[in-house]
């Protein structure tokens, strides 16, 4: 109406007269005029324009998935690896393109959890404050079910020791801890791991007198998880999920020795290359080196 002209005086209607007639504020007209030159047109996105089209970025995503040594990585890790290559995009766009191209890993169905009895935290700020250990199983061609033991540092998610054996005895359960003590502290002696809490479940190997005596000799403080509360030992449980998805469930094994060698080789790759989201998509070994450097300088 403001653009119309009066037939009697041949002049356009002014804003004040029109707004009084419509019983509206003039500020809304001025605001709409100011935004008309600023807002992008339909179909355009605000902010800087990306240098990759959807098709080109999808090919970049396929390239990342093709060279990574891991399988089933989600859109967050793909986004992080794109950033390491210098390809800048958003997590939402990466998710949208991976979903459209059928590149997302299958997700597990959610289940309802009961009341949680573990309300604290098991992820300390520094390494060598809390370790976790547990066991899982894998089928082999010659020896049937074989048990895989592992130990990790809760702060960095780094695997400090691994082992595989046909019989899951209390003696075999100690092997990852012995490896971790030797690799992290440099020797195997009484009290050398003093100050480190060891999180474990209530499996027969871990509550046995031999196991408890051995970790007591090394200086570990036993820290059992709550009964029927696996989240209390969640760090090692999450590590085993990665181990299964990336190794144990994707290839076949002859016997326990074949499993042991494969797990040892995979752990070396995991520690140096697996991206941990809670650490800003950095690998566990790099996080350990950074945290220890900060601790020494302090």
Image (tube, grey):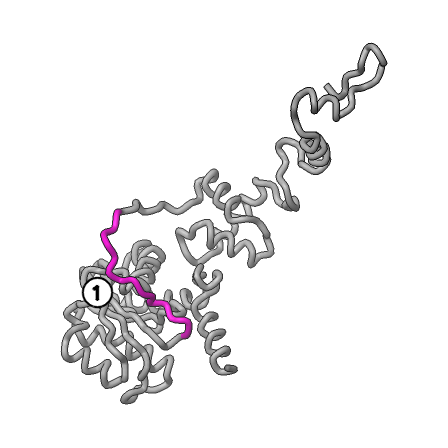
Q: Is residue 140 among the parts visible in the rendering?
A: no
Placement of 224 over or under 249, stated as above or below: below
Q: Residues within 10 Å of mark 1 (few under 14, many from 20)?
A: some
Q: Is residue 210 magenta?
A: no
Residue positioned 52% across, 82% down in the render? 297
Query: What is the x, y in percent for residue 99?
Result: 45, 41
Q: Is residue 118 magenta?
A: yes
Whole-percent x, y for residue 207 in the image: 16, 73
Q: Residue 208: in sight, yes or no?
A: yes
Instruction: From this view, report whether residue 286 is shown above or below residue 140.
Output: below
What residue is shown at x 22% (from left), y 70% (from top)?
A: 224
Tell whether 146 sits left or right of 184: left
Residue under numbered circle 1:
226
Q: Quadrant of residue 277 in the image? A: bottom left
Magenta: predominant secondary structure element? Answer: loop
Quadrant of the frame with the N terminus = top right
- Element type where label 1 sits in the image: loop
Q: Which residues are magenta?
A: 112-126
């Amino acid at each position: 109406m403001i653009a119309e002209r009066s037939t009697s005086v041949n002049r356009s209607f002014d804003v004040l007269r029109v707004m009084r007639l419509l019983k509206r504020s003039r500020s809304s007209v001025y605001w709409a005029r100011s935004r008309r030159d600023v807002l992008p047109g339909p179909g355009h996105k605000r902010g800087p324009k990306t240098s990759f089209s959807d098709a080109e970025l999808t090919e970049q995503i396929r390239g990342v998935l093709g060279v990574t040594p891991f399988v089933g990585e989600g859109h967050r890790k793909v986004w992080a690896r794109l950033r390491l290559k210098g390809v800048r995009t958003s997590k939402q766009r990466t998710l949208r393109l991976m979903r459209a191209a059928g590149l997302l890993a299958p997700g597990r169905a959610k289940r309802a959890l009961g009341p949680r009895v573990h309300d604290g935290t098991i992820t300390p700020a520094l390494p060598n404050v809390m370790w976790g250990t547990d066991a899982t199983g894998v089928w082999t061609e010659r020896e049937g079910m074989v048990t895989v033991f592992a130990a990790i540092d809760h702060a960095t998610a780094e695997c400090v020791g691994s082992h595989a054996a046909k019989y899951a005895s209390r003696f075999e359960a100690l092997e990852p801890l012995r490896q971790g003590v030797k690799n992290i502290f440099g020797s195997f002696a009484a009290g050398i791991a003093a100050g480190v809490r060891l999180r474990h479940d209530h499996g027969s190997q871990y509550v046995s007198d031999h196991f408890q005596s051995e970790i007591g000799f090394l200086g570990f403080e036993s820290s059992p998880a709550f009964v029927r509360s696996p989240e209390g030992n969640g760090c090692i449980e999450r590590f085993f999920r990665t181990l299964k998805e990336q190794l144990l469930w994707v290839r076949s094994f002859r016997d326990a020795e074949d499993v042991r060698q494969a797990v040892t080789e995979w752990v070396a790759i995991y520690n140096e290359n697996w991206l941990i989201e809670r650490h800003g998509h950095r690998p566990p070994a790099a996080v350990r080196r950074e945290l220890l450097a900060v601790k020494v300088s302090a």
